[in-house]
Amino acid sequence: MNHYAGLPQDEAKDKPQVEANAIPPSPSETAPSVNRPKQRGCWHGYRSIVSKFWVWEVFCAVASLVLMAAIVGLLYYYNQKPVSEWPYRWNINSAVALLVVLMKASMLVPVAECLGQLKWYWFDRGERTLSDIDTFDSASRGVVGSLELLWTLRFWHLAAVGAVIMIASLSIDTLTQSVIGTHSDLTYLNNSASLPRNNMYLDFEKLYTGEELGDQIAPSEVVTGLLLGYSWITAMKINDTNIDIPINCPTGYCEFGRYQTIAIGHQCVDRSSEVFFNETVGKWAFEDFVGLDPTNQTIVSANISIYPAPVNKGYTNFGPLLSRTLVMFNDTTGTNQLPIAVECIMYWQISTFETSVSANVLNETGVIAYVNLTEEAQTQYGQAAGIRMRPAECWVNDTLIEKADDFNLGVPECSFAVGPRAQIGLQNTLQSSTFGLSGEILYYPEKEVWGPASQFLLNVFFFQERLNVTDSTSMLKYINTLWMSISWSLTQTIRQIDLTTSDEPIVGYAAQGKMYVHEDYFDVNWQWLSGPIFLVLLSSVFLLITISTHKTHKAWKTSSLPLIFHGLTREHRMAVGEPEKVVDMMECADEEKVRLMISESDGGVRLVSRSRPVSA
């Protein structure tokens, strides 16, 4: 009679132990033992080492760690870098997907082998249902078997860790697909962006007096800028005086920082309370301005180039005077006894701007304006000397030059000037009743029509009618907006005048800026990669624990050969009827409890059922 005992921990050292309820040997077991062929050669030794020391499994675990490190390294290198820096035809997602496939396959190899090894340990530690063999095998192959194994083990076994890894591995592909994203950002390209600015205004058109100061007028582009200024808010952009300038920014995204240009400023004050009726001429008057005829004049405008007395009467600090205009509105509604009068001045200043271009839209903000407040800077109509201005703080292409008013520094970009002929030419243009800021609108009540008027006053009248402006406060607000448009349009025009034909030295014609291009950047969402990294590390730890805790057991792993060489005895197979159908086998396996035992007589290992009596 042969006896069976539990598998020893070290097959090379421990001797078989005889169980009290030893199973009697079958005839096949009492037959003479067959001499086992001795394996020889290097190949046998190599395979033995690979199997015993888990070489293949360790190699796959290391490979999965290396591949995961390669994925992390690749993503770390290209994170926040332009997509254009990826040098290959296939995109980075394809490269990561390939590495993930290899990593996942390498990771699951040791997990499957560990589950197979833990299967034999499961049967070595007690009697188990024969169907548990199928459950462990299914768990090493996929998710369904892993779920079934978790249910069988109730999560309370080392093999449950492997089953969890198998199930969680389904999420690796989905998580890694969400790792790589992109975002758009601006990338510095070069310093080739530019926009017009000027240090000087020297242009004029000669008439009868030629080069001698007299009847010069502004050049045609400045006249056009004037017309645009007082027509803009009336015909096109109500409450919008931002008349853009042409810029050189091909990409549509540029930064110019701070720079300065010669410009025209303005201020307006309400003079309605200072209007008086001049009995001599029978008109409403203000100081020395031409009055408003109450009988037939609706609007009258007069333009002069004389400073108010005192100079700052109602105004804050302003620079060299260009023009001074009074607009008077007659009461046509019968609600006011006195006319409304608004006075505006325009003067030269140095404007500091901060400018950027985004999506081809110019954003220009005035930061500060410098004005020369010295008495020497006060202008007179027809003066022979030009106007010169030099700010204490000068901005050139976003660079601050301090103490720029020190002429010893010799910084030409910080010196601004207006030529005398250009000054009188612009003043003559502003005083013109044809396209300047002077004129009148006559109203004939018997015919209910308006007489001829200047282009400027027609715009004033139509805008007044559109907004139904009748009080001095609203009129001041409207006129101030109108003058803002005029001064801004003139500034934008003057800064675009090409000085290359001038006899004066050319200084800083354009402001230079930085050009950017909209580019896509890689954006790695590391949180989505934490799951795959954890699974790879867990699989390696799972392998190490399995090897260290089961190093004395037979390394059968996932091999099916032990079931052939060490399966049930013939008597046990006959006891269950040797079913041929898989379904019948499964039903019997659910009821049959077996354990790996070792025979005392021949040292053979069998799956033995102690609950079923076996005949001799």
Image (cartoon, helix red, strand yellow):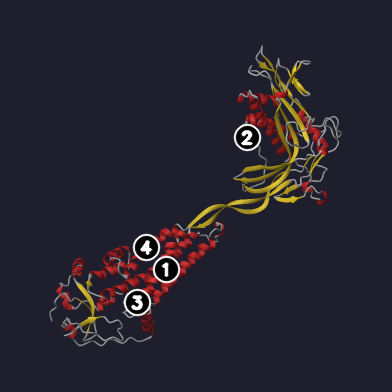
Residue 344 to residue 555: above or below? above
Mark 2 or mark 1, earlier in chain:
2
Q: Are marks 1 and 3 in contact (CB under 8 Å)?
A: no
User: Which residue carries the number 2 mark?
Assistant: 240
In terms of image quadrants, where is residue 206?
Answer: top right
Mark 2 or mark 3, earlier in chain:
2
Mark 3 or mark 4, earlier in chain:
4
Q: Amino acid at mark 2?
A: Asp
The structure residue drawn at horizontal position 35% and vertical position 87%, both measured from the top left corner, is 40
SS type, badge 2: loop
Front-most of 505 and 464?
Answer: 464
User: Which residue carries the number 4 mark?
Assistant: 168
State the CA–CA distance, disc 2 to disc 1. 63 Å
Q: Amino acid at mark 4?
A: Ala
User: Which residue carries the number 1 mark?
Assistant: 537
Q: Which is more foreground, mark 2 or mark 3? A: 3
Q: Which mark is residue 549?
A: 3
Q: Which is more foreground, mark 3 or mark 4? A: 3
Q: Amino acid at mark 1?
A: Leu
